[in-house]
Image (tube, grey):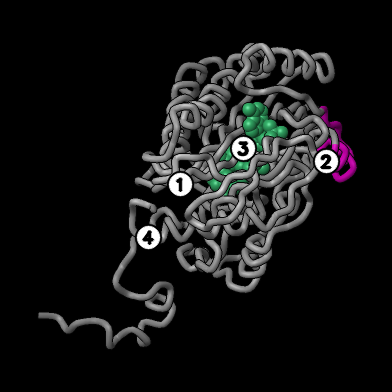
Amino acid sequence: MLAFQPTQSLRLCVHLVAKLTTRPTTGDGGERLRATTPLLNRPLHRRQSGYSTLLVPGDQRVVTALRVAGDPRPCATNHRLLSTMSSKAYVQPLVESTSVFKDGLFNGKVLFCTGGGSGICKEMTRAMMRHGANVAIVGRKFDRLVQSAEDLSKDTGRECLPVQADVRQPKALQEAVAKTIDKFGRIDFVICGAAGNFLAPISGLSENAFRTVIEIDTLGTYHTIKATLPHVRKTKGSYIHVSATLHYKGTPYQVHVSAAKAAVDATSAVLAVEEGPNGIRSNVIAPGPIGGTEGMDRLGTKGVDGDQRIPAGRFGDKRDIANTAVFLFSDAASFITGQVIVVDGGAEHLRTTQLPYPQSVLNPASVQELIRPRL
Ligand SMILES: NC(=O)c1ccc[n+]([C@@H]2O[C@H](COP(=O)([O-])OP(=O)(O)OC[C@H]3O[C@@H](n4cnc5c(N)ncnc54)[C@H](OP(=O)(O)O)[C@@H]3O)[C@@H](O)[C@H]2O)c1
């Protein structure tokens, strides 16, 4: 029996478990581990290739894991997110960076991007390439990196070097940097984007699971900075660290990521201060929920219209983060360093009120009967 009430978080767990079990296993060499949880009394599959795992309180077993690398199938949640994005946005439509910034902005420049083989960081890489940069993308799954590099080069006409490395290993990152220098001769920009995430409450989170996220997000960022800094000093370049907004408040089931990202934010600030006199800038982009990503695929809540909690009226798009990166790496941002740029459609500033949102601001008359007269 579970030892806690069926809160929304629990419902989220149930949803995630239920959704994930519908995905068939594949022959990618991943470990197939069957476990049964009293939560659903169903067999669950664990795949080594995914990094997300759900720990259920009262049942200390690791009960599930995630999507297999390279599995191209979109998930239902993402379909839902993307469809709501286009129909309900209150702000101006999203545009490609090339319609705002000039094409050759980063001609002759080189970007080194951890996590660039997928998701948000791949889209940031694509935008940088569209503006002329050549890039090295770093991750553990070499096949996916190669595929992404081909896709990005074909799309942009720029060079993309896939480099296999685990950001937890300082030596592997030094070798990845050496390969980048061999290929391109310089590094101007660095994106520290590699990260791991999964849902687990403190009571069900093992020390090892906590450590793993700290090692990927925080130590991975540190190792990336250490390996690239000598080269970035030569070009008076710039860093972007991909963080989150989870740690600004107490986000349930996210203690590991919250701790890791808080440390990333602090690391970036110190880097900005220490290396500013060497001509280096360092900033953080903190995305809100971004549709069409593995992160949202795993952590999003089915049946909850999360976009109604976002003042801009839609979930973020990977290109929202890419556009921000283009601006921050450009000389237009030359006086911006040591900052955290939150890109979340205003969600961070929304407090829960008694009044329905957004109806209360879109149509005040519709909620008049809910408002008590002044005393
Ligand atoms: N999605 C969101 O809504 C959201 C919101 C806030 C913040 N973020 C942040 O945005 C960034 C990208 O997230 P995403 O959602 O786009 O997820 P994603 O596609 O899963 O990106 C994570 C990347 O990190 C790489 N990675 C993980 N562990 C690694 C390791 N030990 N060594 C090297 N590379 C490693 C992965 O490649 P391999 O598996 O090949 O190693 C993958 O390319 C992350 O920093 C995340 O925390 C995302």
The first of marks 1 and 4 along the sequence is 4
- 281 to the left or right of 45: left
Q: Residue 56: which numbered mark, if any?
A: 1
Residue at 41% over, 43% down: 201
Viewer-closest of 369 and 167? 167
Of badges 1 and 2, the one in the foreground is 1
Viewer-closest of 341 and 299? 299
The image shows residue 9 at horizontal and vertical percentages of 42, 56
Kind of element beneath mark 3: loop
Distance of mark 2 from mark 4, alpha carbons?
42 Å
Magenta stretch bounds: 147-161
Residue at image mark 2: 152
| Residue contact between numbered discs 3 and 1, judged by CB atoms under 8 Å | no
Kind of element beneath mark 4: loop
Distance of mark 3 from mark 1, alpha carbons?
16 Å
| Residue contact between numbered discs 4 and 3, judged by CB atoms under 8 Å | no
Q: Residues within 10 Å of mark 4 (few under 14, many from 20)?
A: few
The image shows residue 75 at horizontal and vertical percentages of 69, 59
Residue at image mark 3: 51
Of badges 1 and 4, the one in the foreground is 1
Within 8 Å of ligand 1, the CB of disc 3?
A: yes
Viewer-closest of 90 and 314? 314
Distance of mark 2 from mark 3, alpha carbons?
24 Å
Kind of element beneath mark 2: helix
Q: Residues within 10 Å of mark 3 (few under 14, many from 20)?
A: some
Residue at image mark 4: 7
Distance of mark 4 from mark 3, alpha carbons?
25 Å
